[in-house]
Amino acid sequence: MRYSPISRFRGTFLGAFLGGSLTPDGKIQSQSYLDLGRMAILGTESLINLGNLDLDDWIARQQQESLHLAADDISIKIIIATLPIALFFHENPIKLRQNLLRVLKIWEDDPVVRDGTLAVAYAISLALTEKLDPLTLIPQTISFLGETPTSIPNKLLTVNNLLEQGAGLSRAQAEFAREEKLSNTIAMAFYCFLSTLEDFRLAVLQATHNGNSKAQDATSLSSQSTGAITGALSGAYNGIGGIPVNWQVLLLQRNSPAWGLTSFSQMLKLTDAFVAVWSGVYDIDLNPRELTQGCEEALLSVYAAPRVIRSR
């Protein structure tokens, strides 16, 4: 395996956070849309505590936090909110699709949001299972979407054509910056990711760059949306080791709130706990009663479904 699961899990979350925090000139904003990924954190905490997807728990956590989705940013927040599902069920495409569709029912039934969520999650699942081939990713993703009335398959085909032609960033921006639509944001994120597959830094800088004259009208939210999705894709593919060390150090030094958490380091700890639950390993310090209930002598045990725990 090229990169460990924990490296890819961390890379996905950190990549999305960084991609959504960069300014067009490549600097990390001290204050951005802090709640952009708050729902993703709540979903991650639910999966850690329950060990599986429970929609009622997801809804209860959101209501408790009084999270409200503004009309202008609901789409991107939903896609980022489903990142925990993409990671937790990445090994099984059927369960991945089923659980993504279940979670999407929490919010509005928008076909474009559905297709965008499925496309991003499927690409992440291929990256984590090391089955992502840049030459076949887009045809595979379109096949995963199935029959759909949205324009996302056509947008992805346009991305494929641009990549085959070796088109530069300015041409891609001109193609997808004509309208502020989620389908264009998804397409641009796939372009930035696939055109700089092995370079996380360049991928997210491209995603947040608004230098092209035809892209000057892009809003800050649109730039952050493209950056967050690109960062998640590239982070899943390249792992946390592919994210520039100076950016990681800067975040650790600031240790400022991240997606509603008290600090950036808390996000890393949460991700590590998430990987432990996904892998089938239970921490006795977190769940002492569950592991020792009914036993006169507490014995440290590890429980998992068959073939879940294995050498990686």
Image (tube, grey):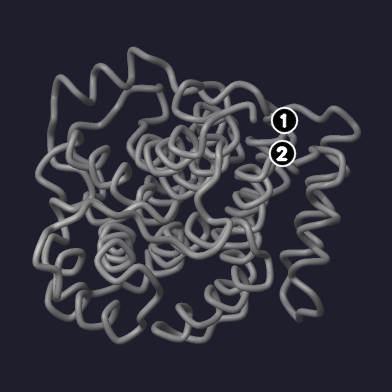
Whether residue 15 sits left or right of residue 198 in the image: it is left
Q: Tell me which amino acid carries mark 1.
A: Ser
The image quarter in which residue 97 lies:
bottom right
Which residue sits at x=62%, y=66%? 118
Looking at the image, residue 135 sits to the left or right of residue 213; the answer is right
Give the distance between the C-alpha atoms of the residues marked 1 and 2, in whole angstroms. 11 Å
Q: Is residue 177 left or right of residue 291?
A: right
Question: How many marks on residues?
Answer: 2
Give the side of residue 88 with respect to residue 73, left or right: right
Q: Quadrant of residue 271?
A: top left
- Depth check, front residue: 20 or 258: 258
Query: Relative to residue 161, is residue 168 depicted above or below?
Result: above
Q: Quadrant of the C terminus?
A: top right
Tell me: residue 241, above or below residue 71.
Answer: above
Q: Hey, what amino acid is under mark 2?
A: Ala
Residue matched to label 1: 195
Query: Residue extending furthest front?
Result: 296
Residue 218 spot, x, y in % from top left: 48, 46
Query: Residue at left 64%, top 35%?
Result: 192
Q: Earlier in the sequence, mark 1 or mark 2?
A: 2
The residue pinned by badge 2 equals: 172
- Residues under numbered marks 1 and 2 in contact, where contact means CB atoms less than 8 Å apart: yes
